[in-house]
Image (spheres, rainbow, N blue to C red):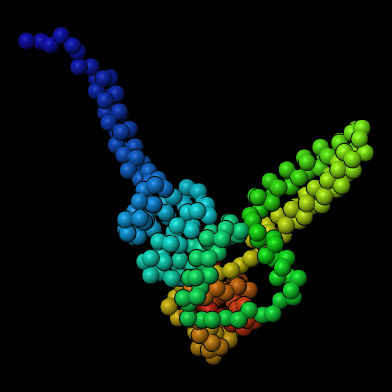
């Protein structure tokens, strides 16, 4: 008996295309990791899965929160160098975050190398801490808010009938103009520091720092995983010139560090 409907070639092609399209979408649907998935894996003690999930999320967009959680997962997995690296990256994005700073300092306290920083002028230390009170974006927002308030108060000074209001407008506007200038200065300083900073973390268990970039060169000193260094020379393919916070310098292999 002949069926009533026709099985045309076009309908078959359409079904095949639909099936192929569905199969192509499956990997994307399966890999759609959310932050909640990563957080659940972390809270359940599945730190390795949490690490994988946080890395996947960071590929779609970086944030201080993701790096902070990644650092926690690495620390729980006894990977000190990677934990410090993640905390350092989180601190770069949100330098004023107290939780990030606390965990970074705590992780640093677990490293073998205890480096004493070179003495800085009191003003320099104070200025650096002031600049890093918050992020560049927050300084930018503050500058916009203060310039708007300054303009409003200047209008009050120009058009208010009472002397008291005019005084408030003048001195208030002047104060907000000063804050506007400082917030722009702090934002510019922080951005410049981030662009010029070439910090890195030792990821090898131990490193023999050389006096010259040659394998059989004399050892200058030894560093261990998790120690922060500043890269001073990256002109050579296999070697990196480094400097420590205590002023010591030397050369190490490029694969023994990871840039922050």
- Residue ID at (38%, 70%): 78
The answer to whether 25 is drawn above or below residue 175 in the figure is above
Query: Is 49 on the left or on the right of 6, as rendered?
Result: right
Q: Quadrant of residue 51?
A: bottom left
- The N terminus lies in which quarter of the figure? top left
- Residue ID at (52%, 60%): 99
Question: Where residue 189 sits: x, y (%)?
Answer: 72, 59
The answer to whether 68 is drawn above or below residue 19 in the figure is below
Question: Where residue 184 sits: x, y (%)?
Answer: 75, 52
- Residue ID at (46%, 76%): 110
Q: Is residue 255 visible?
A: no
Looking at this view, name the residue that lies furthest to the bottom. 218
- Residue ID at (81%, 37%): 152
Query: Is 58 on the left or on the right of 191, as rendered?
Result: left
The answer to whether 5 is drawn above or below residue 102 in the figure is above
The answer to whether 224 is drawn above or below residue 87 in the figure is below
């Amino acid at each position: 008996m002949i069926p009533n409907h026709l099985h045309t070639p076009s309908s078959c092609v359409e079904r095949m295309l639909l099936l192929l399209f569905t199969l192509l979408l499956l990997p994307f649907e399966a890999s759609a990791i959310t932050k909640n998935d990563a957080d659940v894996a972390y809270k359940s003690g599945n730190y390795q899965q949490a690490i994988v999930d946080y890395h996947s999320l960071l590929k779609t967009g970086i944030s201080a929160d993701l790096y902070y959680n990644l650092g926690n997962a690495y620390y729980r997995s006894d990977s000190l160098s990677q934990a410090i690296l993640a905390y350092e990256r989180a601190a770069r994005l949100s330098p004023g975050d107290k939780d990030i700073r606390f965990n970074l300092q705590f992780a640093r306290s677990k490293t073998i190398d205890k480096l004493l920083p070179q003495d800085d002028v009191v003003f320099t230390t104070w200025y650096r801490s002031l600049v890093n009170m918050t992020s560049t974006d927050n300084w930018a927002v503050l500058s916009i808010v203060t310039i708007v308030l300054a303009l409003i108060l200047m209008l009050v000074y120009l058009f208010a009938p009472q002397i008291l209001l005019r005084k408030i407008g003048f001195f208030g506007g002047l104060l907000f103009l000063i804050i506007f200038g400082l917030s722009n200065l702090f934002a510019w300083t922080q951005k410049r520091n981030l662009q010029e900073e070439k910090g890195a973390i030792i990821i090898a268990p131990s490193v023999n720092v050389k006096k010259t970039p040659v394998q059989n060169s004399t050892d200058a000193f030894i560093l261990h995983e998790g120690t922060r260094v500043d890269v001073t020379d990256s002109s050579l393919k296999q070697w990196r010139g480094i400097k420590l916070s205590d002023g010591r310098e030397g050369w190490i292999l490029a694969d023994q560090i990871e840039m922050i």
